[in-house]
Image (cartoon, coloured by chain):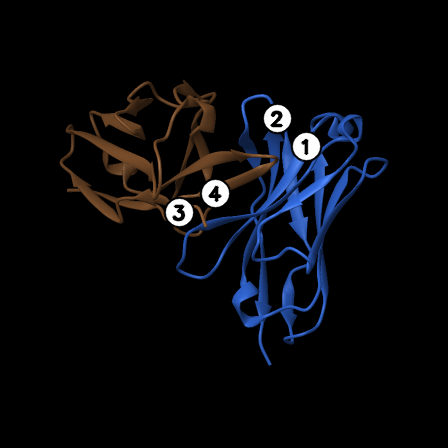
Chain colours: A blue, B brown
């Protein structure tokens, strides 16, 4: 059974950093691309970023709203994807979901339960 | 800035049929955008319903179907049930490893 479990959320002050983790199980993590999607309180879903698998260079893409501040990485030996968030803003307050990506058909097939990040002084 | 448009809200009677749409602020949606649809109830993670325009995800009832209607992607629910009352999101693939979600449609079944 595919499982994605996010961790690392919490309360952080504006301008500070936070790193989220997504621990995967039930599939060959190294073979798959991953993505992060967020949802601000009472708002819709917003795609945050994407990391390809190592066969495709492990390269990353980001939404304009987080580019230059957020970094996605992966540790295939631990089956973990990370979201490093720097220079956090109040508008980054959201539930952050980790998803697996089907790269051929370009969709998010499995989702974690999410972790809440609150940016506030 | 590409905007993906969805109806903010929709209402359907139990047993009725409803079609939700997913468009672009500029241009037409086609299969090359690989439209996919997700269902979300309050406090829960999204659930994948439809991908690649019209393929149902595993376990999704066949009352959910996807298509291209005119210049938009569409999600049709035939024979709506009470537990279909949810938020529905479409997402379009923009190329280069980038996606854009629509704003979501809140579906009421009453």
Same chain letter for marks 3 and 4: yes
Can you say whether B95 is above or below A83 in the image? above
Image depth: mark 3 or mark 4 in front: 3
Image coords of residue A77 (percent x, y)? 86, 36
Same chain letter for marks 4 and 2: no
Disc 3 + disc 1, Cβ < 8 Å: no
Q: Earlier in the sequence, mark 3 or mark 4?
A: 3
Please give the residue where the numbered disc 2 appears in the rendered image: A103
Chain of the residue where label 4 is placed in the rendered structure:
B
Query: Which secondary structure, mark 3?
Result: loop
Same chain letter for marks 3 and 1: no
Please give the residue where the numbered disc 4 appears in the rendered image: B100
* In this picture, residue B43 sits left or right of residue A15: left
Residue that extends furthest to the bottom in the rendered view of this protein:
A121
Disc 4 + disc 2, Cβ < 8 Å: no
Cα separation between marks 1 and 4 = 17 Å
Q: Residue at x 76, y 28 (%)?
A: A56
Residue that extends furthest to the front in the rendered view of this protein:
B27
Cα separation between marks 2 and 3 = 22 Å
Chain of the residue where label 1 is placed in the rendered structure:
A
Disc 3 + disc 4, Cβ < 8 Å: yes
Q: Earlier in the sequence, mark 2 or mark 1?
A: 1
Chain of the residue where label 3 is placed in the rendered structure:
B
């Amino acid at each position: 059974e595919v499982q994605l479990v996010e961790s690392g959320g919490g309360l952080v002050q504006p301008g500070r950093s936070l790193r989220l983790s997504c621990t995967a199980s039930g599939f060959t993590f190294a073979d798959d691309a991953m993505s992060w999607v967020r949802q601000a309180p009472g708002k819709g879903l917003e795609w945050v970023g994407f990391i390809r698998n190592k066969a495709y260079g492990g390269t990353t893409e980001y939404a304009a709203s987080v580019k230059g501040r957020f970094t996605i990485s992966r540790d295939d030996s631990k089956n973990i994807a990370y979201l490093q968030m720097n220079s956090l803003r109040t508008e980054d307050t959201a539930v952050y979901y980790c998803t697996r990506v089907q790269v051929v058909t370009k969709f998010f097939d499995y989702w974690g339960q999410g972790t809440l990040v609150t940016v506030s002084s | 800035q590409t905007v993906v448009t969805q109806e903010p809200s929709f209402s359907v009677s139990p047993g009725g049929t409803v079609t939700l749409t997913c468009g672009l602020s500029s241009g037409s949606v086609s299969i090359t955008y690989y439209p996919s649809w997700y269902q979300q109830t309050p406090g829960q993670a999204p659930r994948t319903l439809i991908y690649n325009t019209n393929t149902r995800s595993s376990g999704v009832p066949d009352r959910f179907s996807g298509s291209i209607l005119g210049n938009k992607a569409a999600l049709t629910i035939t024979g709506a049930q009470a537990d279909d009352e949810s938020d529905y999101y479409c997402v379009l693939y923009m190329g280069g490893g980038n996606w854009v979600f629509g704003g979501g449609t809140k579906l009421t079944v009453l």
